[in-house]
Structures are given as C-alpha cells and as structure tokens.
Image (tube, rainbow, N blue to C red):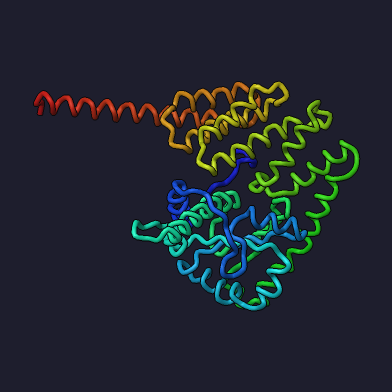
Amino acid sequence: MWSKFRSYLMSKKFIAALLILFALSLFISCGKAKNDEYGCFQTIDQALKNAQKNNQEVLVIVTMQGDDDLSQSFVSDILSTKEFKNEILPSYSVMLMDFSQSSYKKTVVNETDSKAAKKAAEEYAKIVQNNSKTASLLNVSKTPSLYLLTKENYFITEVPYTDQVKTFEDFKKNLDAQSPLVSQMKEFIAAIQKGSKQEKLAAIDNLYENTEIIYRVFLADLIDKYVEMDKDNESGLLSKYLFAQADAKASNLYMSGDLLGATKSYVDICSNPNLEADYKQQAYYMAAYIMSMSGSSDYATILDYLNLSIKANPESESVDSINQVIEYLKSMISQMEAEKQDLDSSSLDTTIGVE
C-alpha cells in the first residue's frame, strides 16, 4: 500500500538454501570466525571491525558456489585471481557469504566426527546463522550479488554483476564506477558530525531520504539518535522518525524470526502522543500485515488492527484500500468456517451411518 513497506521477496532457490542453513544453525553454539581461503571475512562484525580500523568501505559478496554457473565463474575468474588479492583485499574490507550445498555440508555434525571436526562445524553454523540475517536485510535475490557498505554499516549501493562481467578488469570497472556514491555517502556522514543540533538533524534526514527505502534498516542507530535529539519535535519530523524507529526494529526482529516482537514494535508506538495520524494508521496496518505474513490464525486481532488503522485516520486516501483488505479477510474467514461446518457435517454423517 505505502511505499514505505519493505519488500521481502527473494528467489525461491536462494531463500530455500537460506532457510535450510539458518534452521540448522539455530541449534549450534557460538564460535569465532576466521578469514576464508580467499582472504575474505566471514561475518559482518569482522568486516566492520576491520573497516573501522583501516577506514575502508565494506564489500559484501554473496555466492552459491557450485550451485549456479555465475557464482562459479565469479569465484574462478575474479575471486581467485591474484589481482583480487593484491588490489581489492587491501582496499576494501571484503566479506564473503556463501549459501551453497558445500556450505551446508560444513554445518553437519556426525557422531563419528572428531572433537575438532565437530567444533569446526558448530563454528561455521554460527557464521551461517549470522550471515542469513545479513543476506535477508540486504534483500538478496540472486547470486552472485555484491554490495558496498560504510564502515558504520550504512548501505551505499549494490555493485552491478551480470554474465557480461568476464574478467577482473570488468569487475574492477564496475566497482570503481561506484566511487561517486561512496564520496557522497562520506559527505552525508561528515555533515552529521558537525554543526548545531538543527543542522545535525537535517543532515540525518538528508542521509535518510537519500537511502533506498528497503535499506533504511541499516540506519537504525541514526534513527535512534534523531528521536533522542528531537524529543520536543523541534524539527516537526519526530513522528516520521518514531515510525522509522519501529520499522527498523520490526525489520530486525522479523529477519530474526521474532514475528510477535515485530508486530509489537508497530503496536507499541501507536500509544505515543507524538505519533501523527498518518503514521499511526501505517503502524496498525503493518501490525496486521506482519501477523498475516506469519500465518497467524488470530483473525480477530488482525481485523482489530485493520479497523484501528482506519480509525487512526478515517479521512486518508488509504481507507478504501484498507476496507478492501478487511472485506477480503472477512470473506476468507466465512469461507473457512463454511468449509469446516461442511467437514464436521460430513464426519457426523459418516459416524451415524447416513448415506
């Protein structure tokens, strides 16, 4: 409905691999990650720590090595080259996330394995768990995919990669072409760190508006900072950032599998007197949306949130669309109840021998 709604759609092949690896890793203890065979960091925390130390951007690479031809070409023609080692690794804090079948095998622990092998599998499974969330936040939909982040973990841009990239030189050309966006982001961040409170708030808002909607979740710390600095709503934008704060929190919880917590993030801000009607309407609608996405059968609560969404701003242009959702949901509930009644009647007839 609103442009602020995040898109969680990924390719079926990629998301299936992601879910398998994530599920396996939930039962594994934590361990420390080392650089991989290509010299890349294996976790975002590692990469960010190195980026902050060396004042670098983070280059995130996502592959499914051996499971798709383009990933395999990227690994053999670019990632494995001496040029990548000599030119890219010293210039960027490079993180590689691989979600292939070979990665899956690294997480499997067999009873006959040695203690060292079991420990290695457990450590790698923890890496996969963390990387699954990172990939989800990046909205990865294909492999290979490449992204640039700042050392503060703010999203800069996706680096284009297609089957037309045949050599390291082609790859380097695409990467270097992102330099203007990198420079612009540095200017945005520098502006946040100087000037009056009003100037800093304006700088945060400028960065926020210049960040793609689906990647604003990476600005969570700046959003929190804005809300803290503007408690009295001197900017007139506090409501916008209260909703953004809930949205970022909900996104992180959603990606971690806490759908109830994600729903609660939106509901909780609705009691804030500083939240304007339009944002309150969006918050209640998003609460209903997350509940429905979770597969919840608590249709009464979903309907309550949708009705509260209308009540929050009954004159908005979105009311007609929300009413359509309500009518569709009511129709679906009635159909389900009718089917259940028919099934119950059929079962009763069978029990008493009615033909």
Q: Give x and y (percent) for residue 30.
A: 52, 49
Residue 63 is at least partly visible in this image:
yes
Quadrant holding the C terminus: top left
Q: In the picture, residue 230 is in which quadrant?
A: top right
Q: In this view, does 28 lie above or below 346?
A: below
All told, the count of numbered labels is 0
Quadrant holding the N terminus: top right
Q: Is residue 197 above or below residue 14?
A: above
Left or right: where 80 falls relative to 177: left
Q: Give x and y (percent) for residue 36.
A: 57, 66
Name which residue lies at 52% across and 35% down.
290
Of residue 344 and residue 325, the one placed in the foreground of this image is: 344
Residue lying farthest to the front in this orientation = 115
Name which residue lies at 34% across and 30% down.
336
Q: In the picture, residue 203 is in which quadrant?
A: top right
Of residue 251 and residue 126, the one placed in the foreground of this image is: 126
Residue 13 is at least partly visible in this image:
no
Q: Give x and y (percent) for residue 288.
A: 52, 31
Q: Is residue 115 above or below residue 213?
A: below
Residue lying farthest to the right in this orientation = 195
Name which residue lies at 59% across and 27% down.
267
Q: Give x and y (percent) for residue 37.
A: 56, 69
Name which residue lies at 82% across and 38% down.
201
